Image: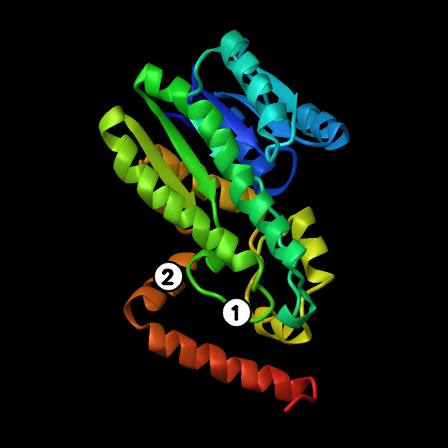
Amino acid sequence: MAKTTQLTGQTAIICGGSQGIGLSSAAEFILRGGSVGVVARRNGTLDQAAVRLRSLVTNSSQFVDVIQADAVDRDDIGPKLDAFIATRGVPDYLINAVGYAGPDYVSNLGLDDFRQQMDVNYYGQLIPTLVVLPHLLEAGRGHIAFVSSMMGYFGIIGYAAYAPSKFALVGLAEVLRHELRPAGISVSVLYPPDTDTPGYVVENATKPSETHQLSATVKVAQPDDVARQFVDGIMKGKFHIFPSGAGTVWRLQRYVPRLVRAFLDRDLSKARRRIGKT
């Protein structure tokens, strides 16, 4: 089947779809013949995303709708997603790509930092799921996808507030995969590595020096490449989706965690020496 017809007649709601992996995933859906409802908080980035996505439309049956809403506020996003579904029908896919990283030394993080990252990264993906899920259950079909991170299965210095929120998403995805399978609803979770997005630029501004050292040897992925592998995985019905080699680290962490921790501790010691810490 040609790529441009793989998703003809199908619709995805993409929360956090105006930038980064979410936007690239929306573009991938359009390129494969599908339609999208893109959700984001800021009108400016939504308008820019709409221009890009509509330029990719090749079929008169395709559409690109934008929905300005805060995924963390159920009172805001709930009625807007319900209205979209009333107009466009029950979506075939819900893609949750809301999230951000605010790394820092744990000694610099306050309780509000932990709450904020849990609110955005976990509840920002849970709330749209809770809104859309009754529609999927009534239809007896659908696919829900979450964007976690490599920090969703192991942790390194600087991510004390971020990693737990991404671990939480994996736990949610595991439960939903098991519970919703008999209802005809499938689930995926993406584990992207460092990816060249606007959020990654912001993230780098507060990374501890050691974290910069640890990530300097890792190739930064491109959002279009990650999105291509994401959508491929969704269409193949994969639960775990590991773009750009992220699966190797997952397997090592799963089967030889002590070895992974030994390497991480060794690399942290080297990083500290390079920046003059003992």
Q: Identify the image quadrant of residue 204.
A: bottom right
Image coordinates for residue 11, horizontal then vertical, percent: 47, 20
- The label nearer to you, 2 versus 1, is 1
What residue type is disc 1 on? Ile
Image quarter where the N terminus lies is top left
Q: For marks 2 and 1, give the CA distance.
A: 14 Å
Q: Identify the image quadrant of residue 146.
A: top left
Q: Is residue 160 left or right of residue 7?
A: right
Residue lying at 45% horizontally and 29% vertically, measured from the top left? 130
Asked if residue 175 can be seen in this view, the reply is yes
What residue type is disc 2 on? Trp
**Crowd rating for badge 1 (residues with CA inside 10 Å; few <14, some 14–19, many 20+):** some
Residue lying at 68% horizontally and 74% vertically, measured from the top left? 209
**Given the current orientation, which residue lies at the most extreme bottom position?**
278
Mark 1 highlights which residue? 156
Mark 2 highlights which residue? 250
Image quarter where the C terminus lies is bottom right
Image coordinates for residue 141, horizontal then vertical, percent: 32, 21
Residue lying at 64% horizontally and 62% vertically, measured from the top left? 103
